[in-house]
Image (tube, helix red, strand yellow):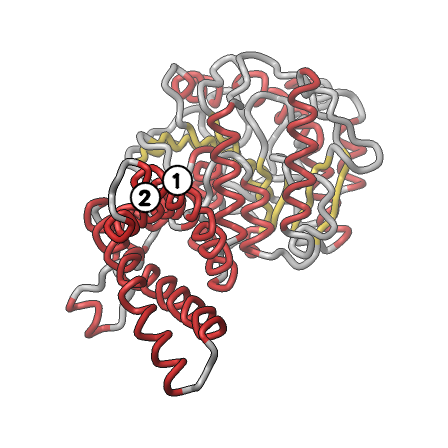
């Protein structure tokens, strides 16, 4: 990592000198009013993930300066994945700020926007961390209220919500984005009713959280819905909401699109299948869908004149391939790096076809030894091979390999730890 100094930043925890009312854009009476309302402590790290937001940086820092006065010591951490001149703009704009500004530029944006937020939380030094977008759709004027509300309510997490009384989604462009936002909210709350209790806007990207409530290594962000990740995996004890009006974008274009939508759906599946029981259920549902390509291939092969026995074996491979693709994409996406794709494919195919070899002897055993009728014996054999196939898939295909040193020390394999790309860090 490299560092450089610019603009004589102050250490976090020392009140920023914003000057007399009216200087540096602070309106008359604002500082006094905030000082009366804000309880101690007030230190906050503002984490701003950016991707090509050069046109928004100066205005964002100006509004943060106007909103945060001397009773709320502040630092801003930009985690930047940009391909334009955003890092240079951040460096230049930071020279005029009365608080420290840190720039972390990632060469490889692992985890997308969510991964950038986790990187920023790791770099935070304050009691409170506020996460907000860099396009000014999240109003910086709400920063003091988020922290103050958290202190007043002794909350762990404070969510700026568009869907609580006084909030609005006015800045969402067009009926399509409004519909997608609402549908996503309903879907997530339906999938996680207990974890998201008390959160009316789980899709919000604007929130404050106590740094002690976040276990960064437990997070597995994928895409831009980091609040959902934090709420489900870190389980904050007390949640409070503050209404906010979603603003129009100040400059640039939205990064939302079909690709981000697909990443969001994969993220939902990953969160929902975090427990072994949930993974087994999804594994079974995927297995059921495999009957469709299996039967279609069997029909085609037998109608082409192939004998039904070799046709059964070949058609079974169509179902195996279908199941493998879905399991790779939906169920074990985050574990694919532990083995080469050819190794995973061969192991999965071997396990799936072993099911055919094992099932018939099991049925014979259940009928002869346990005196079961053929139908219940077949059902029990199917259930047994299903459980064995699931356990084998987890253990032999997708769990990271342990080295001889790992087995001796009991240490986790290095492949099982989360990885981020190279970063460069600057304090401006």
For label 2, the SS is helix
Look at discs 1 and 2 and give the one toward the viewer.
Answer: 1
- Determine whether, in the image, residue 167 is placed left or right of residue 128: right
Which mark sits nearer the N-terminus, 1 or 2? 1
- Determine whether, in the image, residue 322 is placed left or right of residue 307: right
Please tell me whether residue 269 is drawn above or below residue 139 in the rendered image. below
Residue 337 in view here? no
Residue at image location 41% in from the left, 30% down from the top? 103
For label 1, the SS is helix
Residue at image location 37% in from the left, 45% down from the top? 294
Q: How far apart are marks 1 and 2 (CA)?
A: 9 Å
- Determine whether, in the image, residue 398 is placed left or right of residue 284: left
Q: Mark 1 points at which residue?
A: 296
Please tell me whether residue 59 is drawn above or below residue 395 in the rendered image. above
**Closer to us: 387 or 58:** 387
Q: Are marks 1 and 2 in contact (CB under 8 Å)?
A: yes
């Amino acid at each position: 990592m490299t560092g450089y100094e610019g603009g004589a930043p102050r250490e976090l925890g020392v009140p920023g000198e914003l000057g007399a009312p009216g200087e540096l854009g602070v309106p008359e009476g604002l500082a006094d009013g905030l000082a009366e309302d804000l309880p101690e402590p007030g230190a906050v790290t503002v984490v701003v993930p950016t991707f090509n937001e050069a046109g928004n940086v100066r205005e964002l820092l100006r509004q943060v300066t106007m909103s945060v006065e001397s009773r709320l010591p502040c630092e801003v951490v930009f985690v930047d994945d940009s391909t334009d001149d955003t890092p240079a703009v951040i460096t230049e704009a930071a020279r005029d700020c009365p608080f420290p500004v840190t720039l972390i530029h990632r060469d490889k944006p692992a985890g997308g926007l969510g991964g950038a937020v986790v990187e920023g939380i790791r770099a935070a030094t304050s009691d409170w961390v506020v996460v907000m977008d860099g396009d000014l759709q999240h109003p910086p004027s709400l920063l003091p209220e988020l922290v103050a509300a958290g202190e007043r309510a002794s909350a762990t997490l404070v969510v700026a919500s568009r869907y609580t009384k006084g909030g609005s989604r006015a800045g969402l462009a067009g009926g399509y984005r409004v519909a997608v936002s609402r549908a996503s909210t309903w879907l997530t709350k339906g999938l996680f009713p207990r974890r998201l209790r008390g959160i009316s806007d789980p899709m919000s990207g604007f929130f404050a959280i106590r740094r002690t409530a976040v276990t960064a290594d437990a997070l597995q962000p994928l895409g831009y819905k980091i609040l959902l990740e934090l709420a489900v995996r870190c389980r904050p004890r007390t949640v409070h909401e503050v209404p906010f009006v979603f603003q129009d974008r100040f400059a640039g274009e939205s990064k939302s699109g079909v690709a981000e939508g697909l990443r969001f759906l994969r993220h939902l599946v990953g969160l929902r299948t975090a427990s072994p029981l949930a993974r087994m259920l999804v594994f079974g549902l995927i297995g059921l869908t495999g009957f469709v390509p299996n039967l279609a291939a069997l029909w085609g092969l037998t109608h082409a004149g192939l004998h039904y026995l070799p046709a059964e074996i070949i058609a079974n491979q169509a179902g195996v391939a279908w199941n493998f693709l879905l399991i790779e994409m939906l169920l074990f996406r985050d574990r694919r790096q532990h083995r080469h794709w050819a190794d995973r494919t061969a192991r999965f195919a071997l396990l799936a076809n072993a099911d055919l070899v094992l099932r018939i002897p099991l049925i014979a055993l259940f009928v002869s030894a346990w005196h079961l009728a053929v139908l219940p014996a077949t059902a029990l054999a199917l259930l047994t091979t299903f459980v064995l196939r699931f356990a084998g898939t987890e253990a032999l295909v997708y769990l990271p390999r342990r080295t001889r040193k790992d087995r001796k020390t009991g240490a986790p394999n290095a492949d099982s730890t989360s990885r981020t790309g190279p970063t460069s860090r600057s304090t401006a």
